[in-house]
Amino acid sequence: MKTKGGFPGWGIGLLLLLVSSHATVCLGQTTSPTWKAGIARTSITPQESMWMAGFAARDRPSDGMLNELWGKALVLEDAAGQRAVLVSTDLLGLPKAISDHIKKAVQEKFGLTKAQVLLNSSHTHSGPVLEDALTDIYPLDDTQQAKITQYSRWLETRVVGLVGEAIGNLEPASLSSANGVTRFQINRRNNDANLLTQLTELKGPNDYAVPVIKVLDGKHKVKAIAFAYACHPTVLSDTEWSGDYVSFAQEELEKAYPNATALFFQGAGADQNPLPRRTIPLARQYGRELAAAVQRVVEEEMMPLDAKLTMAYEEIDLALADGPTDEKLTEMANSSVPYYQRWAKRMLTKKEKGEPFAKSSPYPIQVWKLGAQPIVALGGELLIEYAIKIKQMYGEQTFVYGYSNFVMGYIPSATVLREGGYEGETSQMVYGQPAPWHSSIETTILSGVQQVAKRAGLFENTKSAKQK
């Protein structure tokens, strides 16, 4: 017997059985994920007027708020019960002491090691000054210093509580990743901002990637979006609290996905500026551009990530060059630049007390694999060449974050160190370091990345290894 369509009756039954079985499998993949994810957020906006971080030219404390400053946490748990925590903050950068306090408390309260906790700062220049961070560039009196110390302790407590809240919110989830693209970053060393409207060709290097991790809940709804970009949040320079273009990007995404939390992670943006800049509409424009790039990725096919975490972390020593001579310090102490004076006088005082200058500085290297997605998170104000070289080593889909765990200065490539200038030399005074980095900095960091990556199960591409 045949039906009107010419198929035997048993054939229809078999077809329906196969379709039903396939639908059951697909449904199982979306509603029974093996990841767990927990999200939490807390305001970290200061509750009183304070000195603002980032620009030495400011001459007064904050006087209002444009955007709320946020701390956000995404806790992930794999099929084996291992956990990892991504924390994003609307701050210039965490100094080592505050980072250490947070990580120690997180380990004591929740059993999470340094390898399992990734702290990232957006590098907004419209956030608060933190304790022991760039202190030479700010004209702080005792009252302001006391506010900074009080805020720093409060911040540590908020971030630790944030992690605990996110752990308490763990629920089944699925993860996927992909890179998008947007192009408002401009290499500030190689393009004159004052001539921008006359330039017909921009010079690099650049990395326009927009790394995205999408987290879906058990009902296949967007729960969280962790995204990154490599560009200074320096559109704004007034005295209102703001995460800059980063705030606007996160707000746009959370409007598009009302049940989701958007978390921003700064990339290797130390030599990349958003240009032109200095108006709120421009900050809003760049935020929308970045959000649009992320949304396009979220709505296209992304790489599903198996529920397996591997993580490794190490702090290496970065050597500094020889310290300044007495003649150099005397010259800088008489400079017309106020923070040059403060830095030089502090160094001279150390010498008079017989205190030796530091010969090196600790540097954090963190490597994760979320399923097949590599993440390399490095400390300091990371220049773009590091992202380019790490992607050459491990593949262009590798996510590279800078400003991670703690920030101790600019991290120039070997090329920029030789060239000098702000990122290669004088920024060390901004960060209170006694000298520029030693010429071995790039080799030391990339070698360190190789060693930490191996412990995380990440190995160089055969092709790129041969090219070296």
Image (spheres, rainbow, N blue to C red):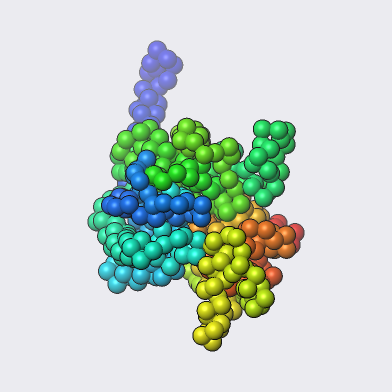
| Image-based side of 62 in relation to 443, left or right | left
User: Is there any visible trace of residue 265 in the rendered image?
Assistant: no
Please state, as top left, top right, bottom left or bottom right, where the C terminus lies in the image: bottom right
Vertical relation: 252 (above or below) 161? above
Please state, as top left, top right, bottom left or bottom right, where the N terminus lies in the image: top left
What is the x, y in percent for residue 414? 70, 63
User: Is there any visible trace of residue 141 in the rendered image?
Assistant: yes
Residue beneath the point at 30% across and 43% down: 218
| Image-based side of 289 in relation to 392, left or right | left
236 or 259: nearer the eye? 236
What is the x, y in percent for residue 362? 52, 73
Residue projecting furthest to the bottom? 354
Residue beneath the point at 26% across and 56% down: 165
346 or 90: nearer the eye? 346
Residue beneath the point at 62% across and 73% down: 329
What is the x, y in percent for residue 234? 51, 46
Residue projecting furthest to the right? 467
Residue beneath the point at 32% across and 52% down: 49
Vertical relation: 72 (above or below) 429? above
40 or 230: nearer the eye? 230
What is the x, y in percent for residue 341? 56, 66
Residue projecting furthest to the top? 4
Vertical relation: 336 (above or below) 57? below
Vertical relation: 132 (above or below) 274? below
